[in-house]
Image: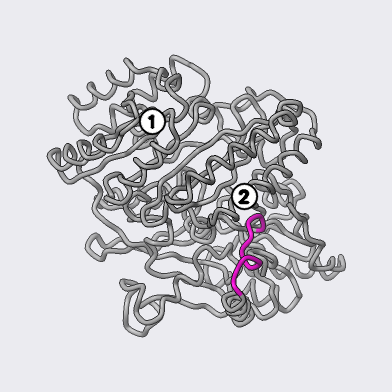
Amino acid sequence: METLETENPPLAATKADGFIASVIAICGEEGALIGESDRRFYSEDLFFQGELPLAVVRPRTTDETALLVTLCRKNGIAIYPRGGGMSYTEAFQPRGSSSILLDSSRLDQIAPIDPIAGHVTAGSGCTWAKLDQALAKHGLRARFWGPMSGGRATLGGSMSQGTVTFGSGHTGASANAVKSFEIVTGTGEVLNTGSDAHHATTAHNRNYGPDLTGIFANDAGSMGIKTAVTLETEPRPDVVSGLSFAFDDFDAMARMFHEVTARRLSSEMIAMDAEVARQNAGQPDLMSDMKAMFKIGASAGNPFAAVSRMASVALGGRRFMEKAHYTAHFVVEARDKAALGSRIKAIRSFANGGDEIVNTVPLMTRAEPFPDLPVTHPDGRRMLPIHGIFPTPALGAFHRDYLALKDRFAERMDAAGVTIAEFFAAIAGIGLLYEPVFYWPDERYGYHARMTPDDLDGKLQDYPANPQARALVEEIIAAIVSLMREHGSSHFQIGRLYPCLSAKKDGEAALLKDLKHRLDPDSIINPGALGL
């Protein structure tokens, strides 16, 4: 993982003091965090540490954001936009001290919700969980309604990075549900996309003329600062259930995902190997398991279904983790019980090579869709996921080459205490997200201390700094990313980890550079992201 040299020289102390005073004049005292511990935390992600910015700046409105951009442009200050911080690809880490880190958490207002409008607008710093709670009061949800990290992840961060999970079996990736963006460019100009960019129209039509919305999706925040997002809404399903299967054969599991995805039979489809399943389940604990069962029961919607669900989970317990090498899980929704039964029957028909097991995972996924996710292994080891997204025809060959690559590193991994597990998610209209997850003993950052869920606080084993294991993780990641590229993968959360500009054809690369220059002529908005 290459670390670029500092891109913006340090600001003189007196000038920095004047700049911070100007920031406070725009955003108020609470709008600028200048303590070292805050600046350090906000400039870290799951793996990368950026240079300390001058301040963490927290605007409340689009107008304040535009004024900040104008101020930064005048002073030659780089702006690194940050969402909920649930990243791992060096997407927002400052590259130089003449910079600010723009935290969007106070841009979290939700516009009045019209139940029949078909869309909702919220500030880019609004979390997916907050938006879903607001829409639920009207019997609605966003058509894509968030990643599993949606308790912390923000609309703007997810749309800048690209993400999947809730709704991906029907809708695909996060950007597919967007109607329009409100953007502050690198000149301080405010832009709207879709029909929202026209006089006397609302944000109801993304494709009113050329699709300008797509330019700002999955851009790592490099094309401009998202201040608001308009999402398509839909009625919440009347009935929800789930199915789970155990597989020994990866190809059989991949075929099932393809058939189910092609027919849009499941709203969420995930799979994992035994190690990831054990991590997600955590350590056996009677009280935690009882709480989980009651959440599953409450999500059933009626007392008879609740008792049935809790009984099935109690009987299955954690035994599903002991079956086969992979477990695949499908959340199924419908308008009524008859339609639900038809979908479940169809999904079961594609499980050739898989054995049906207790459906704990899909039921729990819906009972608690936005859990407080761990940022380490439950035993305290460091964790780092990477991923590639593959069309179905490319999966088998990549999987075999990936396993061979793991075998080549096996001896060194054993010596360093490095392990790799795998997680998978099906994405409608795209293919399968293949996510290796690294674990290794190493010291944790302040980021990990602040982001660790309360139920793990004080329970994690501490490890000394382990630069050798960390270097091995970086070496293996580089090899896997190269292998993914050979097999034609694409990526979300590109940041500065995955190839983007360097992998594009000449004409497309030139167009992307031209757009960046038009929108951000001084390259002050997240410079270096995507290779721009």
Q: Nearer the viewer, mark 2 or mark 1?
A: 2
Q: Is any part of residue 491 visible from this angle?
A: no
Q: How is the image coloured?
A: one colour
| Circles 2, 1 touching at the beta carbon (< 8 Å) | no
- Indicate the quadrant where residue 117 lies: bottom left
Label 2, secondary structure: give it: helix
Q: Which residue is mark 1?
A: 361
Mark 2 to mark 1 CA distance (whole Å): 31 Å
What amino acid is labelled 2 in the image? Answer: Leu
Q: Which mark is residue 98?
A: none
Q: Position of residue 483 (x, y in %)?
A: 62, 50
Secondary structure of the magenta portion, mostly? loop
Q: Is residue 25 left or right of residue 399?
A: right
Q: Is residue 500 magenta?
A: yes
What amino acid is labelled 1 in the image? Answer: Val
Q: Position of residue 493 (x, y in %)?
A: 56, 55
**Magenta stretch bounds:** 496-505
Q: Position of residue 202 (x, y in %)?
A: 32, 75
Q: Residue at x 76, y 26 (%)?
A: 415
Of 468 and 187, nearer the camera is 468
Q: Is residue 207 left or right of residue 387?
A: left
Say whether disc 2 or disc 1 marks the residue closer to the N-terminus.
Answer: 1
Vertical comparison of 369 with 80: above or below = above
Q: Position of residue 524 (x, y in %)?
A: 69, 72
Q: Residue at x 62, y 76 (%)?
A: 506
Q: Indicate the quadrant containing the C terminus: top left, top right, bottom left or bottom right.
A: bottom right
Q: Residues within 10 Å of mark 2 (few under 14, many from 20)?
A: some
Q: Which residue is mark 2?
A: 483
Vertical comparison of 299 with 152: above or below = above
